[in-house]
Amino acid sequence: MVTLKQLAKELNVSISTVSKALNNSEEIGEETVKRVKELAELYNYKPNKVALSLKNNKTKTIGVIIPNILNRFLAKVLFGIEREATKHGYNIITCISNESLEKEKESLHLLANGSVDGFILCVAEETQINNEIEHFKKTISNGLPIVMFDRVAHDVMCDKVIVDDFDATYNATRSLILEKRKQIAFISNIDDLSVGKLRERGYNKAVLESEHFKPLVLKIKKKDDHQKKIKSFFKKNKIIDGVIAADSSSGIISLNTAINLGLKVPKDISVIAFASKSDSYHTLPKLTTIRQHAKIIGANATQLLINRIQNIDKTDDVKTIIVKTSLVKNKSTIH
Amino acid sequence: MVTLKQLAKELNVSISTVSKALNNSEEIGEETVKRVKELAELYNYKPNKVALSLKNNKTKTIGVIIPNILNRFLAKVLFGIEREATKHGYNIITCISNESLEKEKESLHLLANGSVDGFILCVAEETQINNEIEHFKKTISNGLPIVMFDRVAHDVMCDKVIVDDFDATYNATRSLILEKRKQIAFISNIDDLSVGKLRERGYNKAVLESEHFKPLVLKIKKKDDHQKKIKSFFKKNKIIDGVIAADSSSGIISLNTAINLGLKVPKDISVIAFASKSDSYHTLPKLTTIRQHAKIIGANATQLLINRIQNIDKTDDVKTIIVKTSLVKNKSTIH
DNA sequence: ATGAAAGCGCTAACAT
DNA sequence: ATGTTAGCGCTTTCAT
C-alpha cells in the first residue's frame, strides 16, 4: 500500500501538501492538486484505515456478538446489520458466542481494546440462564455503547430491539381458537430463552382466557431427538388438533410428523410456527408462519448504535424498539 | 480507555518505562514493575489495538466475503472460520456479497486499505457467471493474500479449499444404481455455480457409464416456485424412483413432495441430497445426506490464510486442499 | 534502571 | 500556496 509519504517524495512536495490536495483543501494550488491526484490515482492510493482510526479515535467498526450463526433468524439479523452498517460506512467484526457466557465475555473483552466503536448483540443462552449482566455494564461504563436485540437483558440500561413475542403468540393462538380447534399444543425447543418464555406466556394467556381450553406444552431439550419427542407427544395426546411452535424446527417437524401419522393438514390439525419464508417451503402444505422481520431488526439495531456512537441523539435516554411480527397464513391453517 | 501515557503520568515515570514494565522487560526494576502492573490492573488497561496495528503493520484481522449468510453451508463455514481465527488471535470482518459482483469488488476494495491482513472468500454467483477475476488478482498483487473456498476461480493463483463435489455426486448416484433404481433424477437450484456444474457432471458420469440409464435433470431458478416445479416434474416423470439433489432445499422438497404424491420413501423412491445434519431432520423419513464438513472447510481456509500471512510456508506455491464429503445414510435410501 | 526520541500514516493547527 | 510540527498510542533503539 502506497502512503502519503511516498507520494510526497515522488512529487517533491511535503506530506501535508499531498494530504490537503487529496482532501480538496482550498489552500493548495490547482496545478499541484492535479499532479497529486493523478499520481494517487496511478498508485491506487487509499488512506490507511488504521492510521485514520488512531487519529480520529473512531474505528467505524461495529462488534457483533451472536449466539449461533446457524440459527436462521440470527443469520438474517446479521444480514440486516451488515447491510445497514455498510450503508453507513461501517464494517462489522463478528463473534459467535456459541451460547456460552465465557465466550461472550471474552469477545466483549477482546474487542473493547479499541477494535470497535460499539456492540450489537443477542444475549447467549447461558448468560440468560445465569442472569449475568456485569460484563455488559462494564463495557458500557467503559464508553462502548451496546444495542441488544431479540434476547435482551432487561436490567442493563441500553438501547434494545425486540419482537412482540407475547402478542404474536397470543394472536396466533387466538386464531387457532377461532378455527374451533379443541386442543392446541405449544411446542418449543427454546424454553431456556427469554423469548421462549414470552412466547409460552402469550400462548398460555390465550388458552387460559377461553374457559374450554387447557394448556398442553412440550419442551424439547437440545440433546433430545426432536422427531421422536414430537412423535410420542402426538401419540400420547391424540386429541391435539392445533400446534403453536416457538421455533421453526419444532414447526416443521410437527407438521411432517402429523402427516406421517396419517393426519390431514389442516383438516385434522393446524400448525403455526415462528419461522421464515424459506422454512415454510419445507413442508407440504406450506407452513403458516409468524415472521419476525429479522432484517429489519438488524437494520434498526444498527441505526440505534450508529446514532449513539455519533451522538446524534443528545439524550441519554435508552430506547426500545419493538418490531411487530406478521402472521403469514399458508395452507397449514384453515383461516 | 486508559493509555500508557495516563498510567505514566500517575506513576511519575516515563511512557517507555510503563510499556517495558507491562511487557516484562528485564530492564525495569522489580518494584517499578509491580507498581505499574497494579495500576494497570486497577484501571483495566488494555493495549490499544489500533495503535498496535499501525505500529506492526498487521491488523490480526481477516476479511471474510461470503455470498449469502442464509445458506446453511456458508453459515457453517463462517462458523468454522470464526472459531479457528479466534483460536489464533484473529478477528474477522464479515462482508456479504449477496451474490453480486459489484458488492464483492467493493468489499475487497474497501477492506484493502489496511483493515485486514488477508481474505477468505467464496466467489459470488454473478462473478462466476461473468468469469471476472481481475479484482482478485489486483488484491493479491497489492500484497493481500486470498484463500478461496467451495466456489473458486481456478485461474487465480491462490490457496483454495474445495469439496470433492464430482466424486461425491458420482458415488451417491452409484449407490442408488446399486439399489436397482430405474430412473434417477438430478435436481438442482445451483446450476449457475461451479460446484453445481461439478455435481451435475458427477451424476452424469455415473448414469452414463451404466448403459441402462439416461440422465434426467431438473434445474430450478431462484425465481421459480420450488415446490411447484418439483411437483410437476414428478408428475410428468412418474418413472422417477431416485433423486440426487445438489442442494438441501431441493432434497427436502423432493422428499416431502414424493410423500405428498402418495409415494413411499424409500420403497418407491430414494432421495439423497447435499445437506447438513439438521436438514435431515426436516423430513420423515430422515434424509440421506452428503455432508460437506463445512466447519472443517472453514478451519482449513483459515489455517491456510494465517500461514500465508505469517509466511510460515516460505514457498510461493499455492495449495489446494480437498475436503472429502461423507455419505451419511438415513432412511430416505435403502442401503 | 529509567528516559528520550523516532516512527508507524494521517490530519490540522500553525508557521512561512 | 506550501511546509513544519504535533499528536493519536504504542514499541523499541539508543542515550543517560
Image (cartoon, coloured by chain):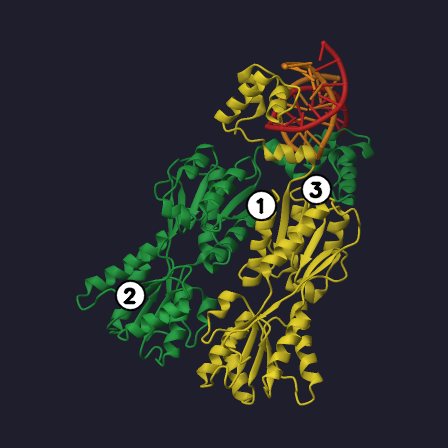
Chain colours: A green, B yellow, C orange, D red
Disc 1 chain ID? A
Indicate which disc residue B83 carries. none
Q: Nearer the viewer, residue B65 or B239?
A: B239
The residue beneath circle 3 is A46
Q: Nearer the viewer, residue A184 or B27?
A: B27
Q: Say left or right for A335 vs C5.
A: left
What's the amino acid at mark 2? Thr
Please report contact status of discs 2 and 3: CB closer than 8 Å, yes or no: no
Image quadrant assignment for residue A218? bottom left
**B203 in relation to A94, above or below:** below
Q: Say left or right for B61 vs B133.
A: left
Which of marks 1 and 3 precedes in the sequence? 3
Disc 1 packing (10 Å; few <14; some 14–19; many ≥20): few
Q: Assign the N terminus of chain A to one quadrant of the image.
A: top right
Q: Secondary structure at mark 1?
A: loop
What's the amino acid at mark 1? Gly
Q: Nearer the viewer, residue B21 or A268?
A: B21
Which of marks 2 and 1 precedes in the sequence? 1
**A294 in relation to A304, above or below:** below
Whole-Å distance between the Cαs marked 3 and 1? 15 Å
Residue B96: horizontal and vertical position, in percent? 59, 55
Whole-Å distance between the Cαs marked 1 and 2? 42 Å
**In the displayed image of the protein, which residue is found farthest to the front?**
B335
The residue beneath circle 2 is A173
Q: Are marks 1 and 2 on the same chain?
A: yes
Indicate which disc residue A89 carries. 1
Residue B137: horizontal and vertical position, in percent? 76, 54
Disc 2 chain ID? A
Q: Secondary structure at mark 3?
A: loop
